[in-house]
Amino acid sequence: MEKQSFSDGLFGPLGIKRVIFMLVLLTTSFISCSNSDEKGGSLEVAQEYRNLEFDARGSRQTIQINGPSEWHISTSESWCKSSHAIGEGKQYVNITVEANDTQKDRTATVTVSASGTPDIIINVKQSMYSVPPYDEYIDPDNTGMRDLTSMQLSALMKAGVNIGNTFEAVIVGEDGSLSGDETCWGNPTPNKALFEGIKAAGFDVVRMPVAYSHQFEDASTYKIKSAWMDKVETAVKAALDAGLYVIINIHWEGGWLNHPVDANKEALDERLEAMWKQIALKFRDYDDRLLFAGTNEVNNDDADGAQPTEENYRVQNGFNQVFVNTVRATGGRNHYRHLIVQAYNTDVAKAVAHFTMPLDIVQNRIFLECHYYDPYDFTIMPNEEDFKSQWGAAFAGGDVSATGQEGDIEATLSSLNVFINNNVPVIIGEYGPTLRDQLTGEALENHLKSRNDYIEYVVKTCVKNKLVPLYWDAGYTEKLFDRTTGQPHNAASIAAIMEGLN
């Protein structure tokens, strides 16, 4: 037997080579095992991820996929989406579903596939939207509720006028308390003659802003006095009897809704629901010519002029959902009633960028509401400030705003086509310029012409874009109609509206 020298042992030249070889082999083996743990030889999705259930709201769930070097993922329905189309090894994937507005449960499949291994099918189920009924709920009743979508109904409404500064009038005390009634801001109680005069002049709609919080019988439960509800109902009946469509809402009421942040959401939602439940039950038996509008110009009074946050938009959109749910949960004709929800501050640009359509248990029975008061310094800037008295091309170079002229009106109102083209009708719930009746002589003459030119142009542009324009009539000197007799008070502005419709 040949003698082995020390240099041929473990620490000799040959031994060192053997050690290096073994280390390389072990390292390679370790890396291979590590990759195998991450990528796996086969495709794996744990059983807990194989059946995903979602409620009707848009939401997402995260699953884990463990596969070979490359795998693919696809979904069977457009409303169900995957955050990945291709992946490799172990990865987390988001499965997102859109809100379900189809009035039925729906299903989809997510397929995960890789070469050389069987596909894995993930079953997705999303429930239909439902609203728990109140104890006062009655079965849906379509009597007097025509088989019309809100888009079809909007074509019948054409143009309207607000009964402003009346039922929404409140006196705010130094301590924030609310009092007053429909006459406390100086306008008389609306009557039959007023509504008949509005109809005779060619209008189809009256919007009656309403406040309720100054008429609580019990503020702790938000119970509204029955006498106040009866008074509002008397006006609603008179308007309907005159052949008008009627819109009632919850208006400003001192601005209690104007704090749309998560910290306030639960309390505000509770109050909004309690009030709308009473209103919906009170007016449940009226036909589809009565429409409910959830709120008014909700914004954030605490923002100090800052732009709204995503939280503000989300909470305000949530108010719309509370309103829709509450009305539907009363049943009867309210199951089918056309409802009106609002963009943030009823601002057109904010509607286009941030409005979320609420879910509903019936299809195509919701309007969107925006208001239009551009240019601000011509329309609603206070008289004490540096307002503009003229508007439009006829007065170019005069006392005219730099913005809000004909082209701006066209651009702004036509941007709402994003809703119209998706069968969501839009009501311009308020528009109209303040009457600067402190002017005299030629200045007043030019101002009056500017006002009527503006009114006609807004109405004409609304008609062109299938929007429903509702003139803001605050009463007083700028009112369209005498609030007592119903006779025209401002015939020239009425004529401007009618001309815009043609």
Image (spheres, rainbow, N blue to C red):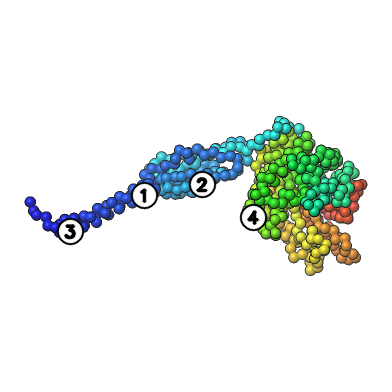
Mark positioned earlier in the residue sequence (1 or 3): 3
Mark 1: secondary structure: helix
- Residue 297 at x, y percent in the picture: 74, 51
Q: CA distance from mark 1 to mark 4?
A: 45 Å
Quadrant in which residue 401 is drawn:
bottom right
Q: Which residue is mark 3?
A: 12
- Residue 420 at x, y percent in the picture: 69, 48
| Mark 1 and mark 4 residues within 8 Å of each other at the beta carbon | no
Residue 169 lies, with reference to residue 137, above or below; the image says: below
Q: CA distance from mark 1 to mark 2?
A: 23 Å
| Mark 2 and mark 3 residues within 8 Å of each other at the beta carbon | no
Q: Which residue is mark 4?
A: 309
- From the image, state whether disc 1 or disc 4 is nearer to you: 4
The answer to whether residue 347 is visible is no
Measuring 87% from the left and 48% from the top, which residue is drawn there? 183
Measuring 73% from the left and 47% from the top, which residue is drawn there? 295
Which residue is more in the foreground, 404 or 292? 292
Quadrant in which residue 455 is drawn:
bottom right
The answer to whether residue 226 is visible is yes
Q: Residue furthest top?
A: 139
Q: Amino acid at mark 4?
A: Thr
Residue 49 lies, with reference to residue 385, above or below; the image says: above
- From the image, state whether disc 2 or disc 3 is nearer to you: 3
Q: Which residue is mark 2?
A: 94
Q: Residue furthest bottom?
A: 397
Mark 3: secondary structure: loop
Q: CA distance from mark 4 to mark 3?
A: 73 Å
Which residue is more in the foreground, 336 or 231? 231
